Amino acid sequence: MHENLFNTDDDIRTHFSDTADSQINELTKELISMSSPIIGTVYDQSKEILSSLVEFKELMMMYKCAIKEIRTKIEVLNTEFNIRYQRNPINFIDTRLKRVTSIIEKMRRKQIPFTIENIEEHINDVAGVRVICSYMDDIYTIADALIQQDDIKLIAKKDYIANPKPNGYRSLHLIVSVPVFFAEQKKDMKVEVQIRTIAMDSWASLEHQLRYKRPMTDESEIAGQLKECADLIAQVDSKMLNIRTKIESNSSEPSEDEILLDKLSKIDTPIE
Ligand code: GTP
Ligand code: MG
């Protein structure tokens, strides 16, 4: 009798397992149908986040390349100046890409939603290049030579040397855009260029460090002293420039031999 129902032990196992499988399948189907809108949403959201992250990384790569373009342009000017006038107008160049946390913090402060388009439109200092010059007049020589290049667009200029900030900060700030050529596109990227002397830079670095220290009790007195230092430093910069100009103008007309020697020394100068 039993044989009518189940022919072998194997059949029994198969039957039971079929029943269990189909029950599990039903349950799984039901669970999926219940949760799929959530799984779908989470999946869609992570896909969106991932693609935004990739887009953000690409944007940062583009800013990094814009920094390289500007750095090269300034290095070229320094090399040319060195051979032509036997003098380096630039002491050093410092570059930085703004950190993600600083970008987010700045956008929050300006109440701008965090999107790729908004970063490009509203944040001018994602790419930063700082040029430290020897003398005050070098600042304007370098700035003018950069601005007049026909692929550079000047977006904004703030002259904190002619008009120092109330705290004494001095520096020439340019926001420029430079075309960067990628494999499949050309893109104009914004770069903030800060140009200042060694003296102005040392003041700015120390003032910046002090600002991030613990809040001080006698803040206004310290601000006053910092302002005094900035003004003294500006006087030193002016004096140094005067001394250089005097030396240049006082030197008597060079003899033919001196001119020849000067030309020969140009040939000997290594090109960096
Ligand atoms: P953010 O300060 O970047 O929002 O730009 P802004 O629109 O106020 O431009 P500004 O040209 O005034 O300043 C740009 C940058 O210059 C700053 O991010 C600093 O790197 C530098 N800077 C401006 N003011 C001071 C200052 O008082 N002290 C120091 N140490 N650096 C300054
Ligand atoms: Mg800034």
Image (cartoon, helix red, strand yellow):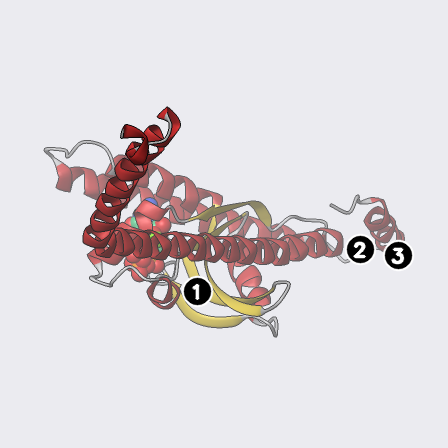
Which part of the image, by quadrant, shows the N terminus? top left
The residue mark sitting in front, 3 or 1, is 1
Q: Nearer the viewer, residue 177 or 260?
A: 177
Name the quadrant containing residue 22.
Answer: top left
In the structure shown, which secondary structural element does the residue marked by tag 3 occupy?
A: helix
Q: Nearer the viewer, residue 257 or 100?
A: 100
What residue is at 59 percent from the left and 66 percent from the top?
145
User: Mark 3 highlights which residue?
Assistant: 256
Q: Is residue 194 visible?
A: no
The residue mark sitting in front, 2 or 1, is 1
| Residue 191 relative to residue 222: left or right | right
**First of labels 3, 1 by sequence position:** 1
User: Mark 1 highlights which residue?
Assistant: 175
Residue extending furthest front? Answer: 1
Give residue 65's position: percent from left, percent from top: 56, 55
Residue extending furthest top? Answer: 9
Task: Measure the C-alpha gap from mark 2 to mark 1.
Answer: 42 Å
User: Mark 2 highlights which residue?
Assistant: 254
Name the quadrant containing residue 270.
Answer: top right
Q: Is residue 111 visible?
A: yes
Task: Measure the C-alpha gap from mark 3 to mark 2.
Answer: 7 Å
